[in-house]
Amino acid sequence: MADSDISRGEVLLNEYERVKDEQKARIGFRDNLLYATLGSMALTVTGAVTGSRAQVLLLLPVAALVLGWTYLVNDEKISAIGRYVREVLGPRLASVTGADDLFGWESAHRDDRRRRSRKWLQLGVDLLTFCGTSAAAILGFWIHGPVNVALVLVSVLELAAVGVLAWQIVVYADLRR
């Protein structure tokens, strides 16, 4: 192996370390978004119930939409980093080193026979967390809220936005093997 191959290999390994660091940071941030979402939901529902103000429920979809979209974007970037390591970085490093099957874990964990069922369950959790609770809050407002044209219009717009988020969550669910 030539010196230029060694330095190229070192550069590629350094890139691998950096993208994995970014992936780890994004995983931690994404997972904390679930706690933030649950906390904001609890505060919103508590505010609506204790103040007997059903219109406060319309804050829940806004929070869930912002946090859900942020969750989705981070989740997609986490997957994109894994894809990049499997499909681009690994083969480039293998061509320099002559080694086979570099970064095997990047592919091996996707071959788990229960992966498909876990991905379907995760899809259900994501839809329930970010979209189901939002739809329930809107329904709660429609049942118990004041009849106010502006707030009803806001709730309809929120429901449409929740539908778009649900569609995007399904599109990015990565249910294939």
Image (cartoon, grey):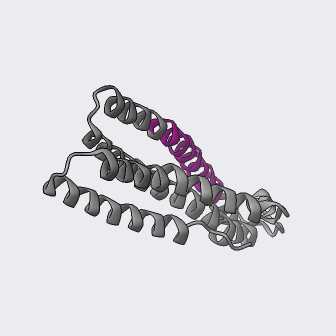
In this orientation, which residue lies closer to the viewer: 73 or 56? 56
In this orientation, which residue lies closer to the viewer: 33 or 95? 33
Q: Is residue 11 visible?
A: no
Q: Is residue 14 left or right of residue 136?
A: right
Farthest residue, direction top? 50
Range drawn in magenta: 10-36
At x 38%, y 48%, the residue is 137
Q: Position of residue 29 (x, y in %)?
A: 50, 41
Q: Position of residue 93 (x, y in %)?
A: 70, 66
What secondary structure predominates along the stretch shown in magenta?
helix
| Vertical order, 95 against 21 (above or below) | below
| Vertical order, 64 against 44 (above or below) | below
Q: Is residue 45 left or right of residue 101?
A: left
Q: Give yes or no for residue 62 being in the magenta stretch.
A: no
In this orientation, which residue lies closer to the viewer: 17 or 31? 31
At x 57%, y 56%, the residue is 78
| Vertical order, 107 against 53 (above or below) | below
Quadrant assignment for the N terminus: bottom right
Q: Is residue 107 visible?
A: yes
At x 35%, y 31%, the residue is 49
